[in-house]
Amino acid sequence: MKKEKKSPDKNILSTLTLIGIIGICLVISSVFVSRIFPDDSVGTQARAVLYTLTGIEILALLLYFAGVLTRVRTRAAQQERRLAETLYMYDVQQTLFDAHRSPRLIVSALQKAADILTAESAFLLHFDRNSIQEFYIWPPETDNEKKIPSGEGMRRTLPQVSALLFGGKKALFYLDGHVPALDDRDRATLEENNVHSLMLVPVVDSTGRLTCALGGINMKHRWTDSGLLECVARDFQMALTNVNYYRLIHEMGTLDVLTGLKNRNCYEHSLAEYTALKDTSLCCLYIDANGLHELNNHLGHAAGDEMLMFVSNALRTIFGNDHAYRIGGDEFIAFCCGCSQEEVTERIGKFHALLDERAYHASIGVAWKEDSASIHAVVSAAESRMYEAKRQYYQEKGDVSKAREMNQKLEQILREKRDADTFLSIISDYFKGVFIVDLNTDDARTIYTPSGFADTLEQSNCKFQRAFLKYIDTKVHPDCQTSFRSFLNYESVGKMLLTGNVPKYHYRETDGTPVSLTVYPASDYTEQKKETFWLLEECQRT
């Protein structure tokens, strides 16, 4: 069996007890000798011996107490040092706890490491595939970063330190003493940068790959090991990992992957900030890249992506990155804060000029925020003006195929935002075609097109009445053609809609298929704005 080791306190008590017993014995002996030999020489010599032994005992006792006091002080100093190290580790951990939200806390933790090391500076290197990706240093205001070369320069100027670091080994050097293990080139580099001492602790992952290194420069205390840095090195590694993951998640949640602009999610959250702006001019630009659909169809999605990236870079260059968003496939929004109308107009001109370099074009709608207007109303106004600009662009270009693509987009927006209930109530499973027709201009926008009618509409330059007359001549049974032409009178159709009636006409196609044509007014139909829905629906044969 193992003997139980006595504690230091028990040893001290045993020693004091023994000394006390010896002292009592000496006193008793002295008294006994004095009584037996009161005056003769023998008694005098005996008493002298006893007095000498008593003096020696007292001296031994004093020396023992001095030793005990020194030991107690040493133990107290060790405990105080351990407590300080424990508090230091806890303090560093607490400081790094929220480093993912505020990376500057890493620098604050480095300051605590420098304080405990009595170092002039402390630094943290973050590696990615054996190259330095990030460099944190305290104090940040000085040029201490230059004292430790980064990247390939470190391998070249500090070959021995680099070999230890990338080999996962610790480094501790003091240049004021004899350091035969330090390479001459390393010594020269450190001396050149006024580094007289260096402590470096690498951190490797489970595969042995170097992930980060924690170090201190110019320490006043002469350390024999790097234990103080080792005990917090993993905490710094975890902080770096959390920072990178948090940054990645934040970018995924706020940035568009393709263009790097802020995404719709970020845009939705930022609207409250624009709403809160007071006494500052605010302009909203709603931007749509023209021709994306055609590029995707004819040249592939890679060409479409290239266009979107170019438009995004132009937007970032002219309007900045802080207030620019990609909110949809080819739709962007930019806000100009504190700018005059002249400045916004100038920027729009520069933006178009950049796009012209690649033969790209974008339609832009502009709206200014008034004091009483909500930010949503401003965005909606800019969006409407963008679609009007887009319509004018395609009409000026005279490209009917592009106009058809634009109209399909307009119909989708209209269906989703303005007339969803109307569409849901009129579209059936047996539709043959659905159009939006402006009775004032005869402009038609298609949602669903009968077979062969798309080409007819294109040849008629998207004029509905002209195209439908051709349709009557080629697809409608001769018995129905005359009455059908009479039904296409927009004046009579408009009057019926204003009186609450629904114009409807039944006819047969040349193959005998019965078809019903019904005209519905848009939700905002007026005498001035005569947008209508024309529904062609196949009827059951009788």
Image (cartoon, helix red, strand yellow):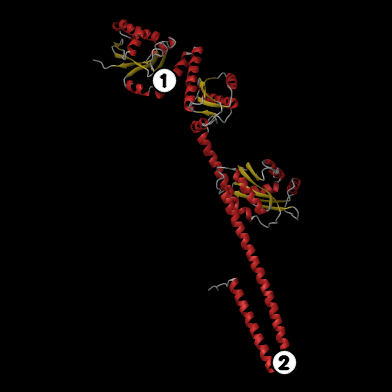
Where is mark 2, residue-wise? 43
Please, is residue 116 above or below residue 542 in the view?
Answer: below
Question: Which quadrant would residue 351 be assigned to in this image?
Answer: top right
Q: Quadrant of the C terminus?
A: top left
Please, is residue 66 above or below residue 529 in the view?
Answer: below
Query: SS of the residue at dot 1?
Result: helix
Q: Position of residue 491 (x, y in %)?
A: 36, 8
**Amino acid type, residue under disc 2 in the picture:** Gly
Q: Who comes first in sequence, dot 2 or dot 1? A: 2
**Amino acid type, residue under disc 1 in the picture:** Glu
Please, is residue 495 above or below residue 154 in the view?
Answer: above
Residue nearest the viewer, comparing 492 with 287: 492
Answer whether labels 2 and 1 touch (C-beta < 8 Å).
no
Residue nearest the viewer, comparing 428 with 14: 14
Where is mark 1, residue-wise? 411
The number of numbered badges drawn on the structure is 2
Residue displayed at 55% across by 39% down: 247
Q: Is residue 30 visible?
A: yes
